[in-house]
Image (cartoon, grey):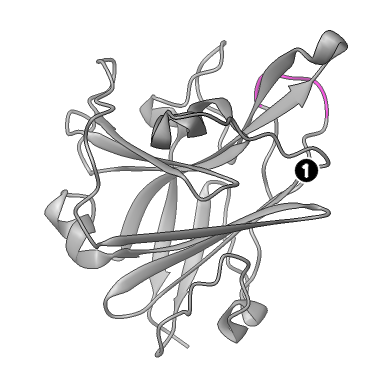
Amino acid sequence: MNCATKKGEYIVQKIENPIQISGNGKDKAWNSVVTLSDFSYPWREENAPLTEFKALYDDTHFYFLYRAIDADVITKEGTLAEKAALNSDRVELFFKGKDDVQPYYSLELDAKGRTLDTKANFGQKVDFDWTWPANELIVKSSVDEFGYWIEGSISFASLRQLGLYHDDNILRTGLYRAEYVKGPNEKVSTKWISWIKPDSKTPNFHIPSSFGTLVLNSKK
């Protein structure tokens, strides 16, 4: 079944049994899922490294799997805890509600499995101290010779609590990746990768036009 029906829309299939989150997509349920790989550099005239995204859901949880091909996975070390993800190779999921004046919520997930969760209103300061509802989010990761994996689950209870899901089979979601690249003298720069090309001349994912639509399909 084609899960990418049109630009900016991805169909998420329903499953009966929960995904076993391993950090590298070992659950057999992922084998039959169509992959979303329509990622690019919105602000660069060059091909981006391969990024793949898959999603599934059941009655209680939304599941996601990212695969990032990366020859040199960079992760910030130190004592910054989850904020270290900001200076590391990572993938991102943003969620917003129906109304753009509502807060949107961000999950920035690095190759070590560190999760930076934030909240903001469009055009306003990001709240880095905010955290996703306790025990409602699971994220695991793994690194191999080709890059890294990020796999996770999010409860629908938390999505409803935050005003992001209204039992309408729609999740308004931004899918992104920060690719860190070493240049001369080991200087590290960031290249931004996105599913949707935002309506911005400069890198910015924190705007409504960067979001796509995940459609939850209950038909088998």
Q: Is residue 180 left or right of residue 153?
A: right
Which quadrant of the structure image shows residue 83? top left
- What residue lies at 50% left-to-right and 53% top-to-bottom? 9
Q: Is residue 154 left or right of residue 23?
A: left
Q: Is residue 147 above or below residue 22?
A: above
* Residue 151 included in the magenta stretch of the image: no
Q: Is residue 32 above or below residue 72?
A: below
Residue span colored magenta: 42-46
Which residue reaches farthest front?
A: 79
Q: Is residue 123 left or right of residue 178?
A: left
Asked if one can make out residue 166 in the rendered structure from this viewpoint, the answer is no
Report the quarter where the N terminus lies. Answer: bottom right
- What residue lies at 45% left-to-right and 62% top-to-bottom? 152
- Mark 1 packing: few (<14 Cα in 10 Å), some, or many (20+)? many
Q: Where is mark 1, residue-wise?
A: 70
Q: Is residue 29 left or right of residue 108?
A: right
Which residue reaches farthest right?
A: 184
- What residue lies at 55% left-to-right and 38% top-to-bottom? 176
Which quadrant of the structure image shows residue 22? bottom right
Asked if one can make out residue 213 in the rendered structure from this viewpoint, the answer is yes
Determine the main secondary structure of the stretch shown in magenta: loop
Q: Nearer the viewer, residue 99 or 20?
A: 20
Q: Position of residue 186 (x, y in %)?
A: 80, 15
The three-letter code of the residue at mark 1 reads Asp
Tag 1, which secondary structure?
Answer: loop
Q: Nearer the viewer, residue 128 or 204?
A: 128
- What residue lies at 57% left-to-right and 57% top-to-bottom? 141
Which residue reaches farthest left?
A: 161
Q: Is residue 142 above or below residue 194?
A: below
Q: Is residue 2 above or below residue 140?
A: below
